[in-house]
Image (tube, rainbow, N blue to C red):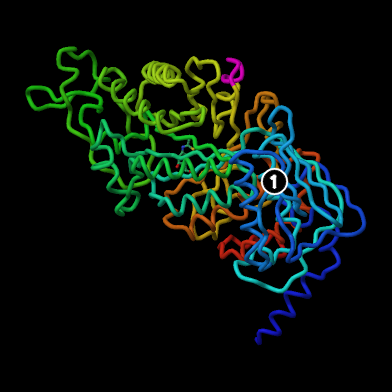
Amino acid sequence: WTLAALAAISISSCQAPNAIKLDETGIIPIPSSISSQSGAFELSSGSSVQLIGTGDDLTRVGNYLAEKLRPATGYAIPVSSEDGDMKLELTSGDPSEKYTIEVNADAVKISSTSAAGLYYGMQTLIKALPVEIENTSKVAGEWTIGNGKIVDEPEFGYRGAMLDVARHFISVVDVKHFIDQMGTLKFNYLHLHLSDDQGWRIEIKSWPKLTEIGGKTEVGGGEGGFFTQADYTEIVNYAADRFITVVPEIDMPGHTNAALASYAELNPGVNLPDGDFATMTEGKIDFDILDKSPEPAELYTGIEVGFSTFATNKEITYTFVEDVIKELVALTPGPYIHIGGDESHVTEKDDYIYFVERVQGIVTKHGKKSMGWDEIATAKLAPGSVAQFWAKEENAIMAKEQGNQILMSPAKRAYLDMQYDSTSRLGLHWAAYIELDDSYNWDPATYADGINKSDILGVEAPLWTETITNRADIEYMAFPRLAALAEVAWSSSERRNWEDFQKRIAQQGKRWDINGIGFYRSPKVNW
Ligand code: TNX
C-alpha cells in the first residue's frame, strides 16, 4: 500500500452519496426525529465553535467538540463567543436532556436548555460526520453534513452501565476509557460494584484493613487493587465532566467475604471459651459474648456466590456500615448509594429484612437514596429507594406495589458478562447466551408482566468480571452490546428497528476500529 492509495480509499469513502444526506446512518442511539433538506454544511479551515450562553459546562462541551474535530481535519477550530459556523446555544427553560440540531449550508447549530443536552447533540453531530473524523491525525476527507434538522430526547432518564471492579480490579485509566465510550453513547450513570467476596476496592479511612487485606486479591488469585479516595474522586469528576453520575455500590449483607476477611468482628457467630465456634443460627447465644470476635474469614478467589454474610445482629456491623456510607457519601455528589442486597443465601430471611431496612435508613439519614438488587423489595422500601431488576419479576412487582421505581437490568438481555454463544472465549451463561440481537430486541416497558413504563427509572447494563481481566476483555464483552443497550435506554420502541440497527452498528464498528476498540464482530452484522 502506498500512501496515495490509502488516501484515495479514504477520499472515496467520504464521497459516498449517503455522506451528504442528513439521516440516521451513523447515529446510535437513533434520534427521535430527523428531517433532511438538500445541500450540505462543510467544515473548513475557517470553522469555529461559537458558544451562545455562559458557564463552565458550556465551555467544556465547546472544547470537546473542537478537540474531537481538530486531529482528523487538521483545522484550528477555535472556541469562543464570537460568530462561528458551529453554534452551541444554551437556551432558557427548565433544564432537560432534549436537544435540537439545525444544519444549513452556512452553519450548524445545536440548542438545548442544558449543557448535557448540548453534549448529547455534539455526540450526534460527530456521528453525522464521515467515520474518518475519528482519526487522531490528519486524513483527507470532505467533512460534510447534509442539511436538515434533528430533534432528540431520551426515553429514560437513567441510562446506566455497571463495572464490577471487585471480581477483577479495573484501573482508573481503564475506567476512564470506558467512561469515554459511555459518553459517546449518551449514558448518564456509571454504577461501580466496589465490593464483593473477592475484593474490597474503595479506601475507607476509618476501616483501613478493608483495602490492606480485602483489596489485595481477586478472582484467580491475582494482586487485586483498590481505588484510593483520590482515585475515586478522579473517576467521579471525569465522569461528571461527561454528564455521567457515579453510583457506588457496597454489596451487603452477602457478597461480603473480603470485608469479613479484613475484620473478624463483622463475622456472624463467636468463638466460645472451649475453642468451639458458634454461629448465630445455632440457637440462642449469650449476648455478653456477641461482640467478641470470631475468626476472620479467609480470602476468597473463586467464583461461587451466596456463602458470606455480615452478622446482622451485632451493633458493630451497623457502626461499620455507617462509617463506610458516611465516607462514600462525602465522596459522591450523585443521589444514589447502592447497597447490593443480592444473593444473601446464608442470611436468615428475617435478618436480611432487618438489615436492609436498617441500612436503607442509614443511607437516607445521610441524604441519599438507596438502590439495591431486586431482592431488597422483600423489605419495606423507603420512598425513593430503587430496586434493580435482574432476576425475579415478583421482586420487581413488590417494589412497584410499594410505590418504588425499578431499574431494568434483566440478566437475559442486559448482562454484558453473558457469552454471545457457546464459543465465546469469555463470559458466563447461567442466564442466557446473548447475541447482539438479543440485547437489542427487547422493550423495558413490556419486558416484565405488570411493570410498565411509568414504573421504570431506566435501564442499566452490568459488566460482571469473574472471567474478565483487562481492557481487551472489557471491550470484547461490552461492544457492540453496550451500543444496543444504549439505544434500548435512549430511543423509543417506535424508533427502534433491528434491520436498521444492523446497518448503523456496522458504521459504529468502523469508528471503533479507528479508535482501536476490540469489539466482538457479531456474525449478525455485515461489518
Ligand atoms: C449474579 S446479578 C450476581 C453477580 C454475578 C453475576 C454473574 C447479581 C445481582 N448477582 O454476583 O457476578 O450473577 O453473571
Q: Amino acid at mark 1?
A: Leu
Q: Please provide percent x and percent y for residue 310.
A: 31, 27
Secondary structure at numbered mark 1: strand
- Magenta extent: 398-404
Say if the magenta span includes residue 401. Answer: yes
Residue at 40% in and 42% down: 232
In the rendered picture of this protein, how many numbered marks are placed on residues? 1
Nearest the viewer among 66 and 84 is 84
Q: Residue at x 44, y 31 (%)?
A: 340
Q: Position of residue 6 (x, y in %)?
A: 69, 80
100 in relation to 381, above or below: below
Report x, y in % for residue 230. 36, 42
Residue 260 within the magenta-colored segment of the rendering: no
The residue under label 1 is 51
Q: Nearer the viewer, residue 378 or 325?
A: 325
Report the residue that reaches farthest toward the right. 38
Which residue is most to the front?
A: 82
Left or right position of 163 against 40: left
Q: Is residue 341 left or right of residue 155?
A: left
The answer to whether residue 82 is left or right of residue 250 is: right
User: For the residue with label 1, is its CB less than 8 Å from the closest atom of ligand 1?
Assistant: no
Location of residue 186 by image quarter:
top right
Residue at horizontal 62%, vertical 66%?
Answer: 71
Q: Closest to the observer: 73 or 49?
A: 49
* Residue that appears at 59% across and 27% down: 406
Place residue 1 in its image quadrant: bottom right
Image position of 327 with respect to 301: above or below: above
